[in-house]
Amino acid sequence: MSLTMIAGASLGVVANAADQSNEAISPEAINLVNEITANMDTSTFYYTAYDYYDQYSVAPTNHYYGVFVPAGISLSSSFSVYMYINTNVLSNNPTDYSKIIISPEYSSYLTLTSFTSNTYLPNCTQLTPSFARTGSPSLPAPMYSYFLDGIQNKSVINSEYDIHCMTSMYSNYPSSFVYTNKGDQLIKCVYALGDANRDGEITEDDVTCIQKYCLELAEPDPNRTATEAACDFFAFRLAADFNQNGVVDMSDAYAISQYITTHSN
Ligand SMILES: [Ca+2]
Ligand SMILES: [Ca+2]
């Protein structure tokens, strides 16, 4: 589909809405379409690598720790996942079950445990959610995400890279893996809501990034493997779903625009 056709299709939606009711077109919607066409160019954007982190910025929105199942792993029907989080990252006791968001294709029998005096991982908390699969997700698939409460208020955290290190099984090393009690290796990512391009800031670039995704102008990084690219895609979708309703669409781009306007002082 050419860019002209995509733009025409997008504008056509608004035009059809106008036929049905003048009230269907809000000034915001018109501005959004105008903004999209102004921002459009012939270049695609790439899904940024899930393990790429800006060295100097911490996005001012909520952070999450996501866990993915890579392609080629056939998980047993019931298993546990071990993830480690330096307690400096958290503001509250991480045994709060409500902090975990389970992907729809998985159910969970949560047995969340924690301890803070691990001999090998001092100052770390082990979180052990146990899962049972109810469906057959097309792999790779995101399995769950965990709310990292209070990151923005932690003086010891100066960058997205720091957060990645502090949620790693290896001290000061940004491991991108978590493990199950069956020996399987899963993939983790840390993402900030709305930071679609994963540069540690919430800017108009994120708005444009989501708009391009909605217009099918996004592509995986050509330097990534198929598994890495699939995880990049899911990490992008989790970060870009600003209103957390399970889909990435223009309403997320608009919501981020509103956020930037509200927080621009
Ligand atoms: Ca960003
Ligand atoms: Ca959304």
Image (cartoon, rainbow, N blue to C red):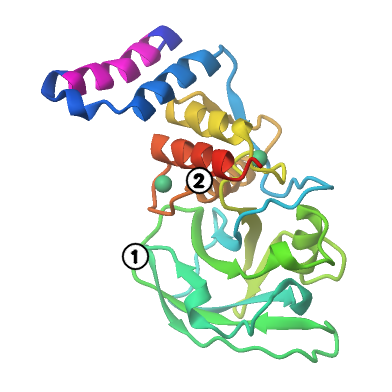
Residue 244: give x, y in percent of width and height. 43, 54
**Quadrant of the rendered image containing residue 206:** top right
Task: Quadrant for the N terminus, please.
Answer: top left
57 or 5: nearer the eye? 57
User: Total marks drawn?
Assistant: 2
Using the image as rendered, state which of residue 110 and residue 254 is in the foreground: 254
Give the residue at x 74% y 45%.
52
Q: Which residue is mark 1?
A: 135
Residue 9 visible in rendering? yes
Residue 182 x/y as whole percent: 59, 78
Q: Residues within 10 Å of mark 1 (few under 14, many from 20)?
A: few
**Image marks 2 and 1: residues in contact by CB distance under 8 Å:** no
Q: Give residue 8's position: percent from left, percent from top.
A: 33, 11
Crowd around label 2: few <14 · some 14–19 · many ≥20 (10 Å): many
Residue range in magenta is 5-18
**Residue 17 belongs to magenta span:** yes
- 54 or 45, which lies in front? 54
24 shown above or below 7: below
User: What predominant SS class does the magenta segment belong to?
Assistant: helix
Residue shown at 73% from the left, 66% from the top? 153
Badge 2 amino acid? Arg
Q: Describe residue 56's horizontal placement relative to residue 9 as left or right.
A: right
Indicate left or right for 118 with 245 as reference: right
Where, quadrant-wise, is the C terminus in this rendering? top right
x, y percent for residue 91: 68, 77
